[in-house]
Image (cartoon, grey):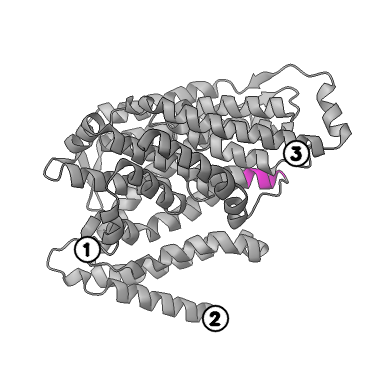
Amino acid sequence: MRVLIGLTSAVAALTAAAATGAGDAGGVPLGRTLSAWSGLPFLGILLSIALFPLLAPRFWHHHYPKVTAFWGLVLVVPFVASHGRAAADELLHTALLEYLPFIVLIGTLFIIGGGILVRGTLRGSPAVNTALMVVGTALASWIGTTGAAMLLIRPLLRANRDRRFKAHTVVFFIILVANVGGALTPLGDPPLFLGFLSGVPFFWSLSLWREVLLVSGLLLAIYIALDLHHWRREDASVRASTQVPHEPLSLEGWHNLLFLAGVLAAVVASGVWHPGDVSLLGVEVPLQNLARDAALVALAAGSLATTRRSTREENGYSWGPIREVAVLFAGIFATIVPVLLVLRAGEHGAMGTVIHAVTTPGRFFWGTGLLSSFLDNAPTYLAFLSTAVGRIYPDVPAREAVLRLAIENHAYLQAIATGAVFMGANTYIGNAPNFMVKSIAEEAGVEMPSFFGYIFRYTLPWLVPVFVVAAWVFFG
């Protein structure tokens, strides 16, 4: 307890010291005056997510909301105390315009996807697993990475329940279905959704089909080789079980597909209908955002009301995964505020040296991707989009500048979008569905790799080389 109190005092003091003076900067944006030390609480929550499940799993399972609240308060209290209204406005802006729409969208997809039950006999052979990966990757851009992941992760787990070696299958499911497959539409992945709200045309991301095809093709080839290797190590009885008679496949709760279509319609409508803004707690919130989120909540409620409880129970549905994501990402979105302010300050901020070096599409790809691995890819996408727009169209209104970037400088937006979506797969915290899939798999008894185990066993040996190839092919 003394160590915890000491740590609290030390970090809070450092955070306050890092922030001191910005509030008296005479109108200078906060991001230009904050020091790199203001990112300490964000680093703290990342290390907590990485280390506690490894070093103190029982403590983390029971107390992760308290740990998250601790780091949030370590940031919020000194940040607001030092900067007053300016800091409060930034936090409210993030909560109302980024966190809430983000959690409403993925929560809705989680609820609707959990109401669709795939019945029938599926055996976890390499062929069946690969087929599920391909289907999920193809669906991800149209029903969202969260929707596709929630639809197929439970059938995948049931198909592999008798296999000893299955963690690698769940990891590649995270990589392909929960990340790479979502790059073709704004509904696919949260970064593209935020880009769409910022002015990127809805169908622009379809132009990324070559990148998706190359990266997903290489990753599928790697997965097939790994799964064949592990398949040969399985007991003969497990391999023989794939030869038993199969119960025909069927879909229960199919009406939830109509709710998924409603989600797609609501998201598209919010990008083409602009009735104006309304002020909430001093933050200007677009009315179309409120209408979209209200529609999503109604669709989620409709799914809950019209889907039989037995269907969800048989699907292994529980609120645990979405609750964990909501809590952890609340802390992440709060503590990331000063980090993003510094990034958005560009060359005038504490990370000016890094931003100054990000000049070519290839560097935008790696810069966006590497930070998306640890900062969550949605706000990181926005930060680098702002950097590119500010550098290329400094005096152009924001939405017009984003549209011109998409049309006139395709390679920059291509690099930012693919870097954020693809490299969100590099860690469990790179994208929200990663955490949900991990949590569901662990509830089903799969021993998933730790935070660092994921990086050393999958990201460094497999993902990074694939991204190097993609960068060489598309950005030179």
Residue stretch rendered in magenta on the structure: 439-444
Judge left or right: residue 252 versus residue 40: right
How far across and how far down the image is residue 214, in percent? 48, 29
Residue under numbered circle 3 = 230
Viewer-side label of 2, 3? 3
Q: Earlier in the sequence, mark 1 or mark 3?
A: 1
Q: Nearer the viewer, mark 2 or mark 1?
A: 1
Q: Residues within 10 Å of mark 2 (few under 14, many from 20)?
A: few
Residue 177 appears in the picture as rendered: no
The residue at the point 16 percent across, 72 percent down is 24
Q: Which residue is mark 1?
A: 32
Please identify, in this view, whether the residue under mark 1 or under mark 3 is nearer the observer.
3
Q: Is residue 200 magenta?
A: no
Q: Tell whether label 1 touches label 2 (CB within 8 Å).
A: no
User: Residue 3: which numbered mark, if any?
Assistant: 2
Q: Nearer the viewer, residue 59 or 21?
A: 21
Residue drawn where x is 46% and y is 32% of the image: 182
| Image quadrant occupied by the N terminus | bottom right
- Say whether disc 2 or disc 1 marks the residue closer to the N-terminus: 2
Tell me which label, 2 or 3, sits earlier in the chain. Answer: 2
